[in-house]
């Protein structure tokens, strides 16, 4: 079922391939929670993070360590050959010679694809500038499947839908599952038209609104994203917009009992800390699910029999 | 066989005996055509360029004649990026021995750079730009690396 050599974008995944990743992730969850395993014994994962990362980097490390494998790390670019002007192509050829797979995060769009052309081993894209972040989308799908349901899903994507790479690839992936998607954003941060047209062409129902209150009572999943201050030249305008997309327990009072709230984290003001105590909060589970999902991808790419 | 039909006979540039005539280039695009073909100012070839002549097919057209060089199909197909109506005439001993239109290949390598300044292909990496041809009329290109589309203003991004 899973014949990939690299994981670069969600567009390269069929519905069946997504299902097989999510199924395998479910079977690996006990190992993510600490059950001993030597599934990846003798395997080495190379981490090439040219940009800061907490969750993605650490969950890949956790996934590999818990499965009995090990991790090598490029470390900060300043102390490495990168600061001497080495090309990305050379870096991945060299580190690809040490490791069984590479995880790369890089500020330039298309960097993971370039890496895949030079690397002798599989490449996993952990974010290429404003481009793709497929392992985030897969863990989001896993969270929705585990904590809600992927079939007949009604979901609201909220916040910065213009620049947020996670929501673009999540919306695309959800279109493969026939989800009903409501886009909630300020007018200046709407999802780009080509992406909306692409979703509609796949038969996905897409609605758009500025008013979160209008949809809150009718969705299964509320997927929040951070609205970045730097997107607004006027600080007053930023405050106004940011406060209109802030979730509190009171705001969730009329929501469905089984509504779940997700967020790729880090959050700033968009979800009040008191929401953490409500039965709706799932963002910490979501970040944990990064471990079994990344375990599944690693096992499929470089595990025994892969 | 005769020389090119639309050309005003005996007026501007005399017919060539051997080489390639590129006709029906959209008016004003002749220099970009030369750029795509890699024919710079330092070429040894005898090159004639006629710009903005009246045309029945196009309102204004350009014509490029390159003497003693028969361009290969893969060389000329790239011209379709900016001159999709162009026709290529291979001339031997004063006669048109082959006449063909241009057809864009599915991928264009090293001819057009990506318009996204943050694309990895616009850095010092040891790669050539790679553009996938999504549609041919109108021309829609998509960068293989960052997936940014490029449709109008292609001439501005010729390498």
Image (cartoon, coloured by chain):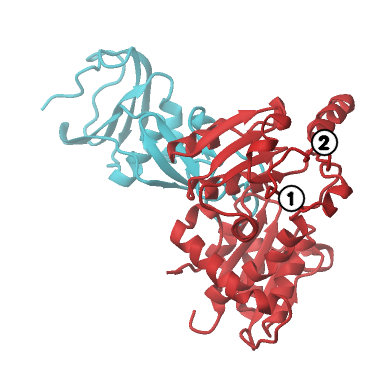
Location of mark 2 (residue): A230
State yes or no: discs 1 and 2 in contact (Cβ < 8 Å): no
Out of A244 and B12, give the one closest to the viewer: A244
Measuring from the top left, give residue B8's x and y in whole percent.
Answer: 25, 13
| Residue at 70 percent of width and 87 percent of height | A36
User: For the residue carrying disc 1, how many other residues have a C-alpha within 10 Å: few (<14), some (14-19), or many (20+)?
Assistant: many
Measuring from the top left, give residue B18's x and y in whole percent.
Answer: 23, 36
Measuring from the top left, give residue A165's x and y in whole percent.
Answer: 65, 46
In the current view of this chain or complex, which residue is farthest to the left? Answer: B1
Out of A167 and A124, give the one closest to the viewer: A167
Please say if A208 is above or below A16. above
Judging from the image, mark 1 belongs to the subunit labelled: A
| Residue at 70 percent of width and 39 percent of height | A158
Q: Quadrant of residue A135?
A: bottom right
Please say if B153 is above or below A117. above
Disc 2 is placed on an element classified as helix
Out of B75 and A113, give the one closest to the viewer: A113
Measuring from the top left, give residue B119's x and y in whole percent.
Answer: 62, 46
Q: Is residue B42 visible?
A: no
Location of mark 1 (residue): A263
| Residue at 54 percent of width and 34 percent of height | A206
Please say if A258 is above or below B56. below
Q: Which chain is red?
A: A
Q: Which chain is cyan?
A: B
How far apart in space, not on screen, are marks 1 and 2 (Cα)? Answer: 20 Å
Q: Quadrant of residue A52?
A: bottom right
User: For the residue carrying disc 2, how many other residues have a C-alpha within 10 Å: few (<14), some (14-19), or many (20+)?
Assistant: few
């Amino acid at each position: 079922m899973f014949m990939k050599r690299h994981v670069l974008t969600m567009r390269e995944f069929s519905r069946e391939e997504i299902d097989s990743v999510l199924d395998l992730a479910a079977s690996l969850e006990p190992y993510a929670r600490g059950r001993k395993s030597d599934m990846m014994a003798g395997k080495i994962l190379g981490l090439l993070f040219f940009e800061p990362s907490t969750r993605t980097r650490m969950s890949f490390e956790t996934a590999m360590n818990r499965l009995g494998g090990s991790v090598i790390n490029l470390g900060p670019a300043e102390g490495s050959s990168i600061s001497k002007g080495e090309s990305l192509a050379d870096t991945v050829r060299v580190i690809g010679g040490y490791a069984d797979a590479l995880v790369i995060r890089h500020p330039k769009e298309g960097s993971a694809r370039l890496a895949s052309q030079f690397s002798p081993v599989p490449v996993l894209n952990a974010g290429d500038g404003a481009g793709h972040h497929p392992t985030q989308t897969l863990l989001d799908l896993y969270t929705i499947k585990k904590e809600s349901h992927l079939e007949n899903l009604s979901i609201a994507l909220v916040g910065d839908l213009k620049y947020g790479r996670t929501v673009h690839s999540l919306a695309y992936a959800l279109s493969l599952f026939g989800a009903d998607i409501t886009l909630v954003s300020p007018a200046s941060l709407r999802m780009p038209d080509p992406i909306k047209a692409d979703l509609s062409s796949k038969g996905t129902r897409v609605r758009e609104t500025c008013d979160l209150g209008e949809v809150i009572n009718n969705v299964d999943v509320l997927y929040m994203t951070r609205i970045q201050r730097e997107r607004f030249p006027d600080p007053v305008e930023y405050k106004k917009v940011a406060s209109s997309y802030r979730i509190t327990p009171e705001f969730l009072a009329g929501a469905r009992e089984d509504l779940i709230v997700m967020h790729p984290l880090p959050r700033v003001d968009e979800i009040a800390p008191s929401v953490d105590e409500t039965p709706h909060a799932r963002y910490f589970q979501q970040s944990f699910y990064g471990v079994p999902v990344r375990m599944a991808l690693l096992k499929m790419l470089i595990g025994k029999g892969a | 066989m005769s020389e090119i039909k639309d050309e005003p006979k005996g007026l501007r540039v005399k017919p060539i005996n051997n080489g390639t005539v590129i006709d029906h280039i959209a008016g004003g695009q002749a220099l970009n055509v030369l750029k795509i073909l890699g024919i710079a100012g330092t070429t040894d070839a005898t090159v004639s360029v006629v710009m903005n002549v009246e045309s029945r097919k196009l309102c204004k057209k350009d014509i490029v004649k390159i003497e003693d060089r028969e361009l290969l199909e893969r060389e000329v197909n790239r011209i379709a990026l900016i001159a999709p109506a162009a026709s290529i005439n291979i001339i031997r001993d004063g006669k048109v021995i082959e006449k063909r239109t241009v057809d864009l290949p599915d991928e264009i390598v090293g001819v057009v750079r990506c318009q996204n300044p943050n694309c990895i292909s616009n850095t010092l990496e040891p790669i050539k730009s790679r553009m996938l041809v999504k549609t041919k009329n109108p021309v829609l290109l998509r960068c293989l690396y960052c997936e940014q589309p490029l449709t109008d203003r292609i001439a501005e991004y010729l390498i």
